[in-house]
Amino acid sequence: MTDTKNIPDSIREKMVQAGISAPAIRSFEANYLKLAQGETGMMSESTLSPVDSIPSFNDLEEPNLIPTELGAKLVVVKLNGGLGTGMGLDKAKSLLEVKDGLTFLDLISRQILFLRKAVNPQLQFLLMNSFSTRKDSLHYLEQYPELPNGRPMDFLQSKVPKISVDTMEPLDWPADPGLEWCPPGHGDIYLSLFATGLLDQLIRDGIQYAFISNSDNLGAYPDFKILQYMDQESIPFLMEVTRRTEADRKGGHLARRKSDKRLVLREGAQCPSADQDAFQDIEKHGFFNTNNLWIRLDHLRALMSENGGYLPLPLIRNEKTVDPTKSDSPAVYQLETAMGAAIEMFEGAQALEVPRTRFAPVKKTDDLLALRSDAYEITEDFRVQLIQERHGIPPTIKLDSEYFKMINGFDRHISSIPSLKDCKRLTVKGSVLFEKPVSVKGDVTVTNSKSDSRPLPEGSYCDQEVDV
């Protein structure tokens, strides 16, 4: 039970006034106490052991149950709370055009409708929206009237107050009261499912498993080989992981805690600066979290009941400014949790090594360029995956952030998507325009050292440095 006497009354008052649920308040108070007691959520290298080998997707048996039986046990949940502000978007990131004129939500919707025809017409589907993404996303999905299937389409993630670094109280920001709040990280999904009553409703409907993934990962697709494996082995929680590449050095990795031998997830924000070299060592820590998770809902419900309606996940403390666009605005703590961190809470939780095709996210415009290129393809069931010839290894793209970081600059500079199917690495320095058909093979660096924009001439470039 949280010792509330050491928590400022202003926290509960602010959250109650905003209509935040009781479990969400208890969860935030628990995290606040960790913060006040000096916890940073850090996991030092000395407390962890690398994970050398785990079960592989490639060794799983094909489903021996008819798909309808498996499909009746499943709900597919997509995390859809992000605005994509890091790419200059002011709307739901899932509304960004990804490939062949289709957005994330187009492809997700078509995946679900395909599965309902192929597997089970009653397959359940939910979005976890934020207050910022709900209206636009649901309006966009009106073009798929059969998608709701007579059930709720979404639920809302919670929000938590930003805490002043100076006063350790919730920060008031009259200039923009919306900036007084922040999302609590995708670990909030468990609490929000519970607090909205959806978790209990799903269980009453006979749903035993949830497949949860990010809406910007179009490789995340409910594979029934994995569902059968969980069902047969009575696994309560399964995290899909894949081999780290150079592009994944900063992504959260799988490890084993020495003290109790449980699997844990360590995010970049939880790694002390002295251990950064070990954190980014992709040979030592060889598996990273795709954020594709499979969960037994009855086990989740039992754990949450034991903990007052929330999971006491490891704290992630992010120090930022209250207005992210103004570096001189007051410093605040944003207290977050990671969805995958729940792996350490389930007795018998497992990780499964999956092919890289199940991980195709868009975090930056670098990723967007790769995804829009011929290095990726749309499958007949509307997944976006690396073409077979790439053997699971994506091209490494590094675009000059000054010109390409924001989507308007990206679109202004790239009107013709280069061929990247044979590209190992593409580095772009300066204001380079991609206006003509271009093929990139091997390792290519394109540089414009001039102040004005310069086009890359049409042609094929292979293992070379190009000045324009």
Image (cartoon, rainbow, N blue to C red):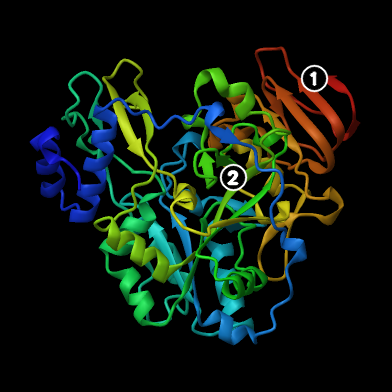
Q: Which residue is mark 1?
A: 468
What count of labels does the image hold? 2
- Compared with 60, 371 (above or below) is above
Residue 402 in view here? no
Q: Residues within 10 Å of mark 2 (few under 14, many from 20)?
A: many
Residue 428 lies in quadrant: top right
At a point 42% along the width and 47% down the height, the residue shown is 91
- The amino acid at mark 2 is Val
Which of 340/368 is in front? 340
Q: Which residue is mark 2?
A: 362
Q: Position of residue 60 (x, y in %)?
A: 73, 68
N-terminal label among 2 and 1? 2
In the image, is 251 to the left or to the right of 26? right
- The amino acid at mark 1 is Val
Q: CA distance from mark 2 to mark 1?
A: 28 Å
- SS at mark 2 in the image: loop
At a point 60% along the width and 68% down the height, the residue shown is 222
Residue 176 in view here? yes
- Compared with 458, 387 (above or below) is below
Numbered badge on residue 57: none
> Residue furthest toward the top?
450
At a point 36% along the width and 51% down the height, the residue shown is 188
Q: Position of residue 113 (x, y in %)?
A: 56, 76
In the image, is 283 to the left or to the right of 405? right
Residue 379 lies in quadrant: bottom right
Q: Residues within 10 Å of mark 1 (few under 14, many from 20)?
A: some
Which of 70/455 is in front? 70
